Image (cartoon, rainbow, N blue to C red):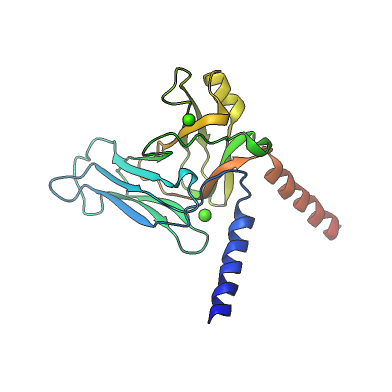
Amino acid sequence: MKLASIASFVVVAGLASSASAFVVQIDDYQSAAFTLTVDYTNAPISTTASASQAGVSGVLGGHRSSILEYIGLPPADVEPEDRSRLRVVTKLSGSLSLSTDTGVTPKVTMTYGGPAFNMSTDLSTGAATAIAIDFLRNDQAMPVTIVLSSALGTPNAATASVTVNVPASTNPFQSLFSFADFVASNPTINFADIDRIVVEYNAPSGSDFAADGIGTIPTPGVAALVALGGLVASRRRRA
Ligand SMILES: [Ca+2]
Ligand SMILES: [Ca+2]
């Protein structure tokens, strides 16, 4: 029995490492499952649902705060399926997923570093140059903003943000948030002392997406080059 447990652990760990090769892992969504729902069919209408989880393994700083909001105006005719649901599903490699009915405009905010917001993480370690979100799928393009805060509680406290328009795709893809763009946003941001990370998914009406993980990567475009190399190799084999 123990041997079987070890074997299955190795398989799961292997899948996780092949899915994401982060230098600093912010969240792989493999621990601390939750389901948040905003529902416009019930009275009183719920507009915000949140979860605050501490001591979560695989999460930078161990603390994950998740908020799901309904930010659109209530539809003229509320229907039984007017709801949005945000989940961390810990089976397989673990994922963060949003599912939303037509007419509902949700917003997802994930915050790391709490509750003290003094995790003092060096995000630039390992020659990292960007934060990457590994999406599994995304049915509609949406702006995603990452807000970094450094040296909180000191005179050098700084906040910088970058917004990326994440494309729609039925296949897995990676979205990159370059450190250089954060610096352009606020040159005093200090990547060696990051205390808070906020990820805002400004999802459109009816948005559905799933992400496998978020963390820093050393060289943007490596994954694309590897994929391109594989394509070239397969063409050569066919030729
Ligand atoms: Ca700090
Ligand atoms: Ca994952």
In the rendered image, is residue 26 in sight? yes
Residue 133 visible here: no
Q: Residue 148 vs residue 172: left or right?
A: left
Horizontal and vertical percent position of residue 16: 58, 58
Number of marks in picture: 0
Residue shown at 59%/62% (left/top)? 13
Closer to us: 239 or 40: 40
Q: Is residue 9 left or right of residue 139?
A: right
Residue at x 17%, y 45% (from the top left corner)? 45
In this view, 197 is above or below 43: above
Closer-to-camera residue (56/70): 56
Q: List x then y, in percent, for residue 110.
A: 40, 41
Q: Nearer the viewer, residue 203 or 88?
A: 88
* Residue farthest to the bottom, as pictured: 1
* In this view, 158 is above or below 113: above
Which quadrant is the C terminus positioned in?
Answer: bottom right
Residue 138: x %, y % from top left: 48, 47
* Horizontal arrangement in the rendering, residue 68 relative to residue 58 (left or right): left
For image coordinates 48% across by 19% down, the residue present is 156
What residue is shown at x 33% (from left), y 42% (from top)? Answer: 67
